[in-house]
Image (cartoon, rainbow, N blue to C red):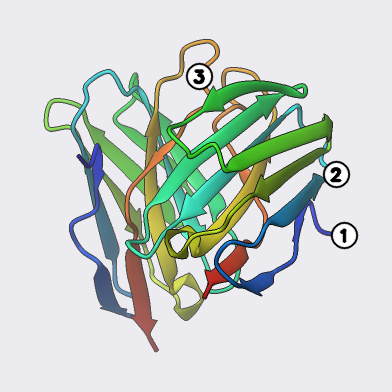
Amino acid sequence: DQQVKQNSPSLSVQEGRISILNCDYTNSMFDYFLWYKKYPAEGPTFLISISSIKDKNEDGRFTVFLNKSAKHLSLHIVPSQPGDSAVYFCAVTYSGAGSYQLTFGKGTKLSVIP
Amino acid sequence: DTAVSQTPKYLVTQMGNDKSIKCEQNLGHDTMYWYKQDSKKFLKIMFSYNNKELIINETVPNRFSPKSPDKAHLNLHINSLELGDSAVYFCASSQSGISGANVLTFGAGSRLTVL
């Protein structure tokens, strides 16, 4: 029973264009959402996050959008660069005290073509 | 200077053996984790320790036993290895607090192959 779904296993985008990675979750109790990026042979690294009190958070070329009613979040990368080629994991959690548990999606492999 | 380091990076062993994976973090974080990434690519939490105290123990066979001698170390010992234990095991750490607890710093992973 997947609580976090990233339905696109892979995505190819031309350099300079926008990359849009999607994530759906099932439980409306989740209130904090994160994106992690992973290169081969390395561990995931934190990229950007958003709290349920917001619907958008921006950090440079990366923007995360949250649609709580649809239980959907997306990561936009503009402009995409070859160095962005990696696997992107969506993660969700409860932000309540004592909550240390992230639930991850399966990841989407992004390939940015020069 | 690696923030979260785990050893060994690769481990190939026979079924039935006992093995350990070590993890150390130099970030001063108070919480450490073990995650497992299986063949289906899901990253699933196994254990979490906060200040050396076990706070998350997901449904993991008793053959898996974590040990945290201090805040900077969290080791994973696996007894009687089975084929299904083959996976990449990631150690991670974070600092407790409303915003910090969810920003995990991961190690590079330890790929375990059971033959």
Q: Chain of mark 2?
A: B
Mark 1 residue type? Asp
Q: Residue at x 60, y 27 (%)?
A: B101
Q: Nearer the viewer, mark 1 or mark 3?
A: 3
Please tell me the numbered disc located at residue B102. none
Quadrant for the N terminus of chain A, please: top left
Decide: few, some or many residues near mark 3? Use Cα within 10 Å; few <14, some 14-19, many ≥20: some
- Residue located at (42% from left, 53% from top): A62
Mark 3 and mark 2 residues within 8 Å of each other at the beta carbon: no
* Mark 3–mark 2 distance (CA, rounded to whole Å): 23 Å
Do discs 1 and 3 share a chain? no
Which residue carries the number 1 mark? B1
Asked whether the residues under the numbered discs 2 and 1 touch, taking CB atoms below 8 Å apart as contact, a structural biologist would say yes
Which amino acid type is marked by label 3?
Ser
Q: In the depicted view, which residue is nearer to us: A87 or B13?
A: B13
Could you tell me which chain the residue with mark 3 belongs to?
A: A
Could you tell me residue A67's position as x and y percent?
A: 19, 32
Query: Can residue B67 be seen here?
Result: yes
What crowding class fits label 1: few (fewer than 14 Cα within 10 Å), some (14-19), or many (20 or more)? few
- Quadrant for residue A81, please give it: bottom left
Given the image, on which type of amino acid does mark 2 rest?
Asn
Q: Quadrant of residue A49?
A: top left
Q: CA distance from mark 1 to mark 3?
A: 29 Å
Q: Which mark is residue B26?
A: 2
Secondary structure category for the residue under label 2: loop
